Image: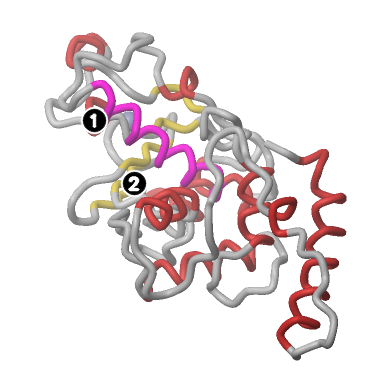
Amino acid sequence: MRKIILPVLAGLLAACTAVTVAVGSAAAEPEPVATQDVHASDGCYTWPRNLSQGASGEDVRQLQIRVSGYPGYGAVLALDGQFGPGTKAAVTRFQQAYGLSADGVAGPQTFSTIYALQDDDCTPVNFAYPELNHCNSDWSGGMVSASQARANALVTMWKLQALRHALGDRPIGVNSGFRSVACNNAAGGAANSRHMYGDAADLAAGSQGFCTIAQQARNHGFSELLGPGYPDHNDHVHVANRSGQFWSAPNCGI
Ligand SMILES: [Zn+2]
């Protein structure tokens, strides 16, 4: 998170842009370039280059995680490290959501916005690992490895951050996230519950209300969505990732 530095960074970016234009138009005198300052490191992850359609690699995958909440209605963004049309569209929606120039290319403005949105452990600023795990502290005992469960929860948090931002940046509470098999059994969870994979979250009504949350969640990358009117879901909205889409919240028109 680097929110304090942003105004300074904006100034540097403007200066850098001006320098780049001058160099690009074959100015007679070379000018000092401040790119090291523009790409100042972040506590979690620092992108080493701008990213656009056609790029591939781990830095693309890191970007995909951050924009996974912007796949469009009913869609899920693949976290495959390949910057294709879906990633471009997600980056564009992210840029629109934060008032950036929306060209689908991840450059300094986009990365600065992400840096300001993430904590040093790579979680988005409004969510944290303990909120996504009321079962244990080491993420063990689920249906996937502890590291995979934790990684799944990270993606879910970025989707929740997108949902939260779309609903006016009002708090969203998570009543239950990751559950080991034992925790899931104790909670009376379904035998195939996504909570055991780390990507599920049971959301409180907050000031938004269940149906507002459930309806908006359809835009933010959750292929599993259960809410009021679905058995045992009148007191929370359950969102998760799964293969194939399953949405049901009849009392909310879903
Ligand atoms: Zn649930």
Magenta stretch encompasses residue 164:
no
Looking at the picture, tell me which residue is in the foreground, 238 or 126. Answer: 126
Question: Which residue occupies the extreme front position in the image?
Answer: 29
Amino acid carrying mark 1 in the image: Tyr
Look at the image and give the residue range highlighted in magenta.
146-163
Q: Please provide percent x and percent y for residue 195.
A: 27, 28
Q: Quadrant of the C terminus?
A: bottom left
The residue at which mark 2 appears reads as 225
Q: Please provide percent x and percent y for residue 36.
A: 69, 52
- Please, which colouring scheme is shown? secondary structure
Residue beneath the point at 42% across and 53% down: 59
Label 1 CB sits under 8 Å from any ligand 1 atom: no
Cα separation between marks 1 and 2: 15 Å
For residue 197, which numbered disc appears in the image?
1
From the viewer's perspective, tell me whether residue 208 is left or right of residue 180.
right
- At numbered mark 2, what does the secondary structure look like: helix, strand or loop? strand
Amino acid carrying mark 2 in the image: Leu
Residue 76 seen: no
Picture quarter containing residue 237?
top left
- At numbered mark 1, what does the secondary structure look like: helix, strand or loop? helix
Magenta stretch encompasses residue 150:
yes
Residue 91 seen: yes
Q: Does residue 205 sit above or below 189 in this rendering? A: below
Mark 2 closeness class: few <14, some 14–19, many ≥20 residues within 10 Å: many
From the viewer's perspective, tell me whether residue 193 is left or right of residue 14.
left
